[in-house]
């Protein structure tokens, strides 16, 4: 059984615990062992902290990487922001030995050292590349007939030159994973557009953030999708809460929750009642 250090991030455990619960149960069903990463902090948020103080950002990220390295495990996260922050930090530290030495001077103050060996993985990417679509299909007990919108977000695929997961402008990984449940991923305009929340836009310029959200929702509604399927709790939050003020009512599910439904999990286990936009299955 493949084993990973489970990096929860901030939003999932605090705002959408159903994402955490469904990820744990789905991972176990698919042969993945998730080990809690003790004493982990915020990733930290790439669009905010890195923009203001890169030294603080990379030291905080390196601390999380060092905790996983200490356990001899790679990190697995269900959040695009956490994935982007930790992946980028691990990449920079692996490429720049002088930077790694500087960061270790900071970590030494708290009794840690990072050797640069931790790999950072996203839950969706692990499902696609390590578990495989056919193995997932074999675990589906309740095939779905939903028409859905696959929402990739920004940090899952990009920066594409170092992640090299998929075509960043016309991706298919998430669509393939969704359709393993029997659901249909509906084609739409501007498929890889930002949800509007990232880079501090939601906090600093909420009106501009909502313009992105509205455009996405209009495209999703036009596609005929009944649900939005995301792989990031921050995108999840933006769509779940933001659309109420925009006059839309398209339920939002994290990919792990979609798999939970298709694997016959109870709705209470999935935490669907925590959503602001009601999820009616």
Image (cartoon, rainbow, N blue to C red):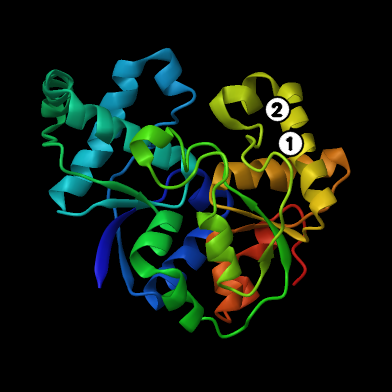
211 left or right, relative to 127: right
Q: Residues within 10 Å of mark 2 (few under 14, many from 20)?
A: many
135 left or right, relative to 101: right
Residue 199 x, y percent position in the rendering? 55, 25
Residue displayed at 37% across by 60% down:
129
Q: Quadrant of residue 204?
A: top right
Q: Residues within 10 Å of mark 1 (few under 14, many from 20)?
A: many
Q: Which mark is residue 209?
A: 2
Residue displayed at 13% across by 26% down:
104
Q: Can residue 77 be seen here?
A: yes
Q: Quadrant of residue 154?
A: top right
Secondary structure of the residue carrying tag 2 is: helix
Residue displayed at 15% across by 37% down:
116
Residue 131 x, y percent position in the rendering? 37, 69
Residue 75 x, y percent position in the rendering? 29, 50
State yes or no: discs 1 and 2 in contact (Cβ < 8 Å).
yes
Q: Is residue 46 above or below residue 69?
A: above
Q: Is residue 74 above or below residue 210?
A: below
Residue lying furthest top in this view?
52
The alpha-carbon separation of the residues under discs 1 and 2 comes to 6 Å
Which residue is disc 1 drawn over?
A: 213
Q: Is residue 66 above or below residue 77?
A: above
Q: Which mark is residue 271?
A: none
């Amino acid at each position: 059984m493949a084993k990973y250090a489970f990096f929860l991030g901030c939003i999932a455990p605090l705002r959408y615990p159903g994402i955490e619960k469904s990820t744990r149960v789905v991972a176990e069903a698919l042969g993945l062992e998730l080990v809690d990463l003790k004493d982990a902090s915020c990733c930290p948020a790439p669009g905010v902290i890195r923009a203001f103080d890169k030294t603080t950002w990379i030291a905080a990220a390196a601390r999380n990487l060092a905790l996983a390295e200490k356990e001899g495990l790679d990190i697995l996260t269900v959040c695009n922001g956490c994935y982007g922050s930790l992946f980028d930090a691990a990449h920079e530290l692996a490429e720049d030995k002088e930077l790694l030495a500087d960061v270790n001077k900071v970590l030494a103050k708290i009794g840690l050292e990072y050797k640069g060996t931790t790999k950072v993985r996203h839950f969706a990417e692990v499902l696609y590349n390590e578990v495989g679509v056919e193995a997932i299909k074999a675990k589906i007990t309740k095939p779905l007939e939903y028409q859905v919108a696959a929402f990739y977000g920004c940090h899952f695929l990009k920066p594409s030159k170092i992640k090299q997961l998929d075509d960043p402008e016309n991706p298919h990984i998430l669509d393939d994973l969704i359709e393993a449940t029997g659901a249909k991923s509906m084609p739409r305009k501007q498929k890889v557009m930002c949800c509007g929340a990232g880079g501090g836009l939601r906090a600093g310029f909420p009106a501009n953030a909502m313009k992105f959200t509205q455009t996405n929702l209009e495209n999703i509604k036009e596609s005929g999708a009944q649900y939005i399927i995301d792989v990031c709790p921050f995108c999840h939050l933006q769509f779940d809460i933001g659309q109420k003020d925009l006059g839309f009512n398209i339920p939002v599910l994290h990919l792990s929750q979609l798999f939970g439904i298709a694997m016959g999990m109870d709705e209470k286990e999935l935490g669907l009642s925590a959503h602001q936009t009601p999820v009616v299955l």
